[in-house]
Structures are given as structure tokens and as C-alpha cells.
Amino acid sequence: MRVVTAAEGTTRAGDGPAAARIPVFGAPYDWDPIDDAVRRHGAAVVSGLIGTDQVAGFNREVDDWIAADAGRLAPETESERYNLFLGRRTLRIHALPAKIEASHDLITHPEVLGCVERLLSHWSNGALLSAAEVIQIGPGESSQLLHRDTASWWPHLERSEHPWNVSAMIALTRFTEENGATRVVPDSYDWPLERRPHPSQIRRAVMEPGDVLFFRGDLLHGGGANRTASQDRRGVTLSYCAGWLRPVDNIMLAIPPARAASLSDELLSMLGYTAHDSTGIRGGLVGTYDYTDPLRALRSGELH
Ligand SMILES: O=C(O)CCC(=O)C(=O)O
């Protein structure tokens, strides 16, 4: 394991000791300090984790999807405020498991998932995919509002040293300060909700394609402004939650049983096709189908 550098690079005049950096770890990966950095500071970049071929294959599928569907990719929700939050010059592809086949191997990538599952393990013996989205920030986009992903559930839920929602943002192009590298406020996961960061506390996840920013869902973060004339910043974000929590995206509607039948058990369990079993710790079961495990029902032909 090698701690390479701080992700934002330079220290600017006025940076106080309180302005923490995003730790960056390179190969060979030693996961204990990486897990620890994400847990204690809220974020870490793991450089070169996703191979060049995997990134290239993913990008090819995304290019094809965009070429076929570009007119509809800046999301239009019923809320103008939410549309602004999502960005008017940002292309987004949601429900990835149904649209981009290369997402399957990323969602179950052993090292990505290993890190996420260890971080969630205080709360859950298994993770669910909560949302998966390609986010391509286009030239002229402004900075996204800093936010916590956990606000989707219940913003006032008591915070803990252990996260129950963890995301991996995988760089599919270079992430630079100019083209919209993710903005992150290290250590902000346990701040009072109303506390805003000093500008010097906002760091940038400067990354190369294949680098991964792991961050806690309760950490303040947001997309950066794209001040370039012609460069898209493309990433894919995979957000995972405790296995008993309701995911943000209703992914089983995107992958109904007829489509699910050809997918691996491991992927299906991330998509909600297995029950979460806490009986081993005197708990119960959630996500069952007619008293049984949905995966068993799927494989026996009971679900169509
Ligand atoms: O694109 C990014 O860097 C972050 C985007 C984000 O946090 C979001 O859209 O919720």
C-alpha cells in the first residue's frame, strides 16, 4: 500500500490545519487503512482499482447509449428545484443494471464490494445496491449543491461512526478541478446538519480513469463546475446501503423476474432478489416472497 498524495494537490493560502485532505491510496492495496480512512474521514481515493479494459468496455456501452438516447438524458423530474440539483448540462443514465451490461461486473467488483461490505458490516450482514448512475458533467455546468446522500432516507436520523450507506464514484474520464471533479468535505459526516464548510474545507477528487472515490453517504459532497469549453467529465456512481434498508432506486422494476433469470446469484442479491436474514442475531427476515427467499422462488420457476 502506498499513500500517494492528497487528492486536491496543492495547499492554498488560507488553508488552516482544519482543512483535511482526501487520502489517496495506490496499489498494492492494503484495505485496512483504506477502510479506516473512509470510516474516519468520510472519503478516500483508491487509484487504479478498475482496469483499463473494464473502463474502456464500460465507456463503449455508455457512448452507444448516449448516441441512441442523448435527447432524453438530462433528467426532467416534476420538481424544477430537483432538476437544478441534478444539473441542466449533466447527462445521467439511471437504472444501470438494465441498460449497461458492463455495470454488472462493476456492481459486484470484488474489491469495491469488499470495501463497501466491510464498512456496512456494523449494521448489516450484506449490502444492497441503492442506486447506480452514470453522471456526465458537461461544459458550462455549475457546481452542484453540497449534499448528503443519506438525506434521501431521513436527514435527521442520528449519525454514527459507522456508515449505513457508502458510495463508490468510479472515474471513467479524467476528473480535474476544471472539468468537474467531485467536491468533498472531509470529516463533515458528523457535523450538525446546518453547518456549512469554509471554502478551504472543500476538496476535489482529482482522479484518472479507473480511480475510485469511496465515500460515506452522510458526507457532504457534490459535483464540481465544468469550466472547460469541450471536455465532459464522466463517472459512474454505485451507491450501496445496509441490506435491510429500502434502496433509493426501485431496481427490481428495472430488472423484473423474466430478465433476472439470466443474471448471477451474486448480482441478484445486490439488486434485492434475496431476503436479508438477521435470524442469526435474533432478528428476522426482510424482502421475502411468499415466506421464501425470492432467489429460490426465481430459480424454481415460481416467479415470471
Ligand atoms: O458527479 C459527482 O461528482 C457527484 C454527483 C452527486 O453527488 C449527485 O448527483 O448526487
Image (spheres, rainbow, N blue to C red):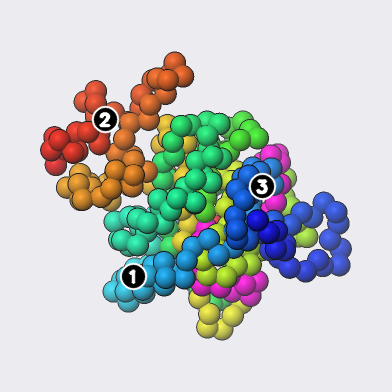
Question: In front: mark 2 or mark 3?
Answer: 3
Read off the residue under disc 3. 33
Name the residue furthest bottom.
Answer: 229
Viewer-proximal residue among 246 and 77:
246
Q: Quadrant of the N terminus?
A: bottom right
Location of the C terminus by quadrant is: top left
Is ligand 1 within 8 Å of the beta carbon of the residue shown at mark 1?
no
Residue 66: x %, y % from top left: 35, 72
**Quarter-of-image position of residue 183:** bottom right
Circle 3: element type: helix
The disc label shown at residue 218, or none: none
- Image: magenta residue range: 169-193
- Provide the secondary structure element on which disc 1 rests: helix
The amino acid on which the numbered mark 2 sits, given as a three-letter code, is Asp
Q: Position of residue 93 (x, y in %)?
A: 38, 62
Label 2 vs 1, first from the N-terminus: 1
Cα distance in 3D space between marks 2 and 1: 33 Å
Q: Residue at x 26, y 30 (%)?
A: 293
Q: Are marks 2 and 3 in contact (CB under 8 Å)?
A: no
Q: Earlier in the sequence, mark 3 or mark 1?
A: 3
- What residue would you read off at disc 2? 293
Asked if residue 105 can be seen in this view, the reply is yes
Identified at 36% across, 24% down, the residue is: 285
Q: Residues within 10 Å of mark 2 (few under 14, many from 20)?
A: some
Please state which amino acid type lies under the numbered disc 1: Glu
Q: Which corner quadrant of the image does residue 213 belong to?
A: bottom right
In the displayed structure, does residue 260 sit left or right of residue 209?
left
Ligand 1 near label 3 (Cβ, under 8 Å)? no
Q: Which residue is mark 1?
A: 61
